[in-house]
């Protein structure tokens, strides 16, 4: 088989591929398509949204009380030269500031 004979099928394939890619497909939509889709949509069950978490005032006050109590418990230990109680006291103080800021901005 000569190189010319091998090139002819490749050229034919390239021509057919080009023609197929450049030809726009014919789109056919049935007349009752929208009505059928509307009926199918009505038949689907309606999903109810998940309940949002709501914090009660009592729960927020209890969280603040527990946080302040934990800060007071670790305060004497944070005065020593140990790193762990001091680090825990700083983390609790930052948490207190973060909660206060979040609840203040959320209330607006």
Image: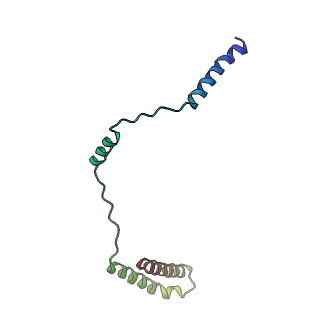
Q: Which image quarter: residue 62? A: bottom left
Q: Residue furthest right?
A: 3
Residue 46 vertical position relative to residue 94 in the rendered view, above or below? above
Q: How is the image coloured?
A: rainbow
How many discs mark residues in the rendered view? 0
Q: Residue furthest front?
A: 31
Q: Nearer the viewer, residue 48 or 41?
A: 41
Residue 56 percent across, percent down from the top left: 32, 77
Residue visible at 33% across and 61% down?
50
Q: Nearer the viewer, residue 100 or 26?
A: 26
Residue 75 percent across, percent down from the top left: 49, 87
Q: Nearer the viewer, residue 35 or 62?
A: 35
Residue 23 vertical position relative to residue 97 in the rendered view, above or below? above
Q: Is residue 53 left or right of residue 77?
A: left
Residue 28 percent across, percent down from the top left: 42, 33
Residue visible at 61% across and 28% down?
18
Residue 39 percent across, percent down from the top left: 28, 44
Check the picture and name the quadrant holding the N terminus: top right
Q: Which image quarter: residue 33? A: top left
Check the picture and name the quadrant holding the C terminus: bottom left
Residue visible at 50% across and 32% down?
25
Residue visible at 55% across and 30% down?
23
């Amino acid at each position: 088989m000569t190189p010319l004979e091998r090139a002819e099928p490749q050229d034919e394939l390239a021509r057919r591929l080009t023609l197929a890619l450049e030809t726009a497909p014919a789109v056919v939509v049935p007349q009752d398509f929208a009505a059928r889709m509307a009926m199918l949509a009505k038949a689907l069950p309606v999903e109810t949204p998940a309940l949002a978490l709501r914090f009660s005032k009592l729960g927020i006050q209890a969280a603040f009380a527990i946080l302040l109590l934990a800060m007071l418990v670790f305060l004497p230990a944070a005065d020593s030269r140990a790193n762990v109680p001091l680090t825990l006291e700083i983390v609790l103080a930052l948490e207190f500031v973060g909660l206060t800021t979040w609840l203040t901005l959320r209330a607006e």
